[in-house]
Amino acid sequence: MSQQTKPRLILVDGSSFLYRAYHALPQLSNSQGEPTHAVYGVSGMLRKLIANYQSDYIAVVFDAPGKTFRNDLYEHYKAHRPPMPDDLRVQIEPLHKLIRAMGLPLIMEPGVEADDVLGALAQYAQQQGFSVIISTCDKDMAQLVTEDIILENTMSNTRLDIQGVIDKFGVKPEQIIDYLALTGDTSDNIPGVPKVGPKTAAKWLAQYGTVENLIACADEIKGHYGESLRANLVQLPLSKQLTTIKCDLHLPYVMEHLKRQPIDKAALKDLLTGLGFLSWLKTLDNSAEIEVVVEKKPAVCAPDYEIILTEQRFNYWFEQLEKASLFAFDTETTSLDYSKADIVGVSFAVTAGKAAYVPLAHDYPGVPNQLDRTEILEKLRPLLERPDKAKLGQNLKYDMHVLANHGIALRCIAHDTMLESYVLNSTATKHNMDDLAKEYLGVKTIHYEEVAGRGAKQIPFQEVSLEQAGPYAAEDADITLQLHRVLMAKLEQHPSLHKLYTDIEIPLISVLARIERNGVLIDTAMLARQSLELAGHIIAIEQLTHDLAGQTFNLGSPKQIQEILYDRQKLPVLRKTPTGQPSTDESVLQELALTYPLPKLILEYRSLSKLKSTYIDKLPQQLDAKTGRIHTSYHQAIAATGRLSSSDPNLQNIPIRSEEGRKIRQAFIASTGYKIVAADYSQIELRIMAHLSADDGLMKAFTEGHDVHRATAAEVFSIAPDQVTTDLRRSAKAINFGLIYGMSSFGLAQQLGLSRTQAQAYIDLYFSRYPGVKNYMDSIRKLAREQGFVETLFGRRLYLPEINSRNAASRQYAERTAINAPMQGTAADIIKRAMLATDQWLQQEKPDARMIMQVHDELVFEVAEDQLDYCTTYIRKIMCAAAELDVPLLVDIGIGNNWDEAH
């Protein structure tokens, strides 16, 4: 009897999926703030299995509480595993109730693990003439695979049959136990053989067959691996025993016990109501079946992909592109660095499920003849450069750069799926195509590593065979087109988000690309001098720390720092790591540094070392050989609040409070005949707070042009503005900025060197003088709890899934974010609007000036010396008009030979 005609048993590894769902899904909670995401994930998986297989036989197996026989065999078994998180523990009981209400047999056997129960039930069912699907994420279960037992991972949509096990692990299913015994398992604390990884284990088993044969021939194994094997021969039998699933259990079940029962509709309705699974609740009708209500994914067309190698087929596709109102376009290249990337091939799609790849520069032995890259790009140029021909892509800014490297100016970027996803919900998922396809289409795409390899063995794309490259590249265009249809439909349901997408994010692509290509000039000689000076300073600090410690130690080693601070210096332990060791992270050292000199020096050493390695020594290496400039990459879809981030180099993280950090900015210089112009919004987030809160005191200070920190000091400390000292102004500034970032009295006390009581008194005074701010904070927290998100003035949303969490720390973080995100996000929107307007002026009026950087609330330009007055006047005017607030926007402009001088 074939597996298809045999009755089928579905066995679910409930414990495996419980943890996977807990870690994989964003935190969800019901109306009472009780966490529900693990329940949601596991129940969704169960309903998917029921829908897919329609089997009468299904059972869900969980680990029973308490120790198992493996703990008796080896006292350290799973000893390193942290305890179950509290917000997962409270989800177990409702999940079990839900499973039983669904009519599914639920099994827990004391003294053994869920794996053992699954193995015993699978073999029993096989003996009864059943085929078995085990739904699990656990690699150990591969030892159970036979012709009639297959593993399925519902979360990753992958299956493992006998050949699948061989392909994945390099050994047969019956060798998996030996394989695991050799490699060990750090999560279960199974020792294995040190230094022996999957490849070595598979190689040995291919030669010797079993661990027992390997032990008998251990003297034949040469080198370090052989030494490690022989040194651990005694523990190998134990490792094998620990990894062996115990299939000979005497369980009190027959197949009838593993049969689905009618659902308990009343209990199920009560549970779904309490959990807040309302969409599932709506689908329950009078039938006895459980309907699948996992959010319906749009139908994904069966792929019809083509590799174009002839002019005839290219001309056919070119005609389709010309006729299309919108087409998806993608490039395959030689590098992820846009400044160095050359085109290897291009792909496009016009209709869902149908796409083509044009290979142009693949190079490997036996590669078929390809169309000429120069000729094809020239044929595509008019289409790509047409300002009225709508194009769609995923992260099209990169493709824009790559085409520019070949002299093509990509115009009319109509849509970008990365930005559609980001604007729709910045925190729902990562915004890469693979994750978006899984989230919104339910499709597992071909990953780059599957065609090009991983790690050191990864080959450049031009060396990937056309048989592999074609489907991968064509899929990119096809899936992008299908994603656009889904994401745009969702965006159109929210007019403010749609407007944000079309008016800000999409046009910003071209602006950012221009800024990136402009780049900024670097004085490498100055950086070389700074590197030498800083190296001497770092050595001096290192020596001083050794003197204070009374011995030499490695300042780069957390373990040695831990020993020095806590074991030898006996400093108080403020926090511990998850493994119970005293923490040496930065926040802990900062607290200790308020009282003790050694942690302060260690922090200074870390800071200077990071400056030297991250910027001073690295910036010269990042110069483009052709332009002699630094070309950073700006990212629109990373920061949840809408702010831009940058990389290679990260311009946002260059410190400006320290002298050494400011010196780095001195190396960002203007070309001869030009000056650096830095235009910085003045206290923009406080101005936005004044607008949002409508607080009379803050509004008055900004409207009348007062120094807001001096005005706050005068209000809080009940003195005249001219009596405010530098220290009092500093305290007021800390309060002004600290409160909008959610700073507690403890944090303010640390920053100002006060007692916590005194810091709290300052905060209370602040709120009594600015009651509108307090009212705003209270109201925005309440609104966030009710609707689950907050918005900027321009409609950008930040969802806060933890705002009603029972976990106090998670909930408080979400509340602080609810207060701050509308200000940060609005500031981000404003500077983006300023960039768009400034770029439009630069393109239309064409002054001898270019925008070269955007950092925090600042735009940086390189302006010809003879046009400084003209340009600074317009820059200020444009930036001040980027938004209409109830208080004026002010822009501070500085001019200098370098960035530091201009700031």
Image: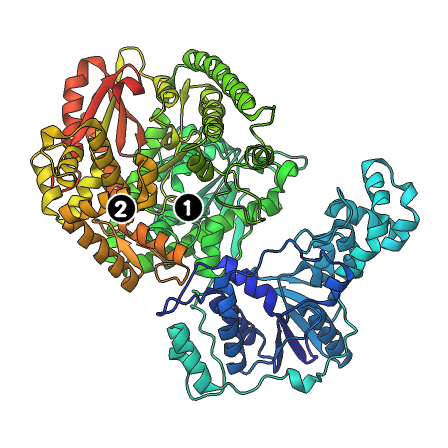
The answer to whether residue 166 is visible is: yes
* Crowdedness near tag 1: few (<14), some (14–19) or many (≥20) residues, C-alpha within 10 Å: many
Q: Which amino acid does the dot numbered 2 rest on?
A: Gln
153 shown above or below 335: below
> Could you say which is closer to the camera, residue 220 or residue 464?
220
Check residue 348 in the rendering and tell me which mark sits there, or answer none.
none
> Could you say which is closer to the camera, residue 574 or residue 255?
574
746 shown above or below 872: below
Q: Which amino acid does the dot numbered 1 rest on?
A: Gln
The answer to whether residue 324 is visible is: no
**In this figure, which residue is indicated by the disc labeled 2?**
760
Task: Give me the residue at 46% from left, 13% from top.
Answer: 533
Q: With 384 as the anchor, is 869 left or right in this view?
A: left
Q: Quadrant of the C terminus?
A: top left
Q: Quadrant of residue 275?
A: bottom left
Residue 175: x and y in percent read: 80, 58
Q: Quadrant of the N terminus?
A: bottom right
Residue 815: x and y in percent read: 31, 54
Q: Secondary structure at mark 1?
A: loop
Residue extending farthest left? 704
* Crowdedness near tag 2: few (<14), some (14–19) or many (≥20) residues, C-alpha within 10 Å: some
Check residue 394 in the rendering and tell me which mark sits there, or answer none.
1
Q: With 308 as the anchor, is 850 left or right in this view?
A: left
> Which colour scheme appears in the figure?
rainbow
Q: With 786 as the anchor, is 108 left or right in this view?
A: right
Q: Secondary structure at mark 2?
A: helix
N-terminal of the pair, mark 2 or mark 1, is 1
Residue 29: x and y in percent read: 40, 66
Q: Quadrant of residue 212?
A: bottom right
| Distance between the alpha carbons at the discs numbered 2 and 1 | 49 Å
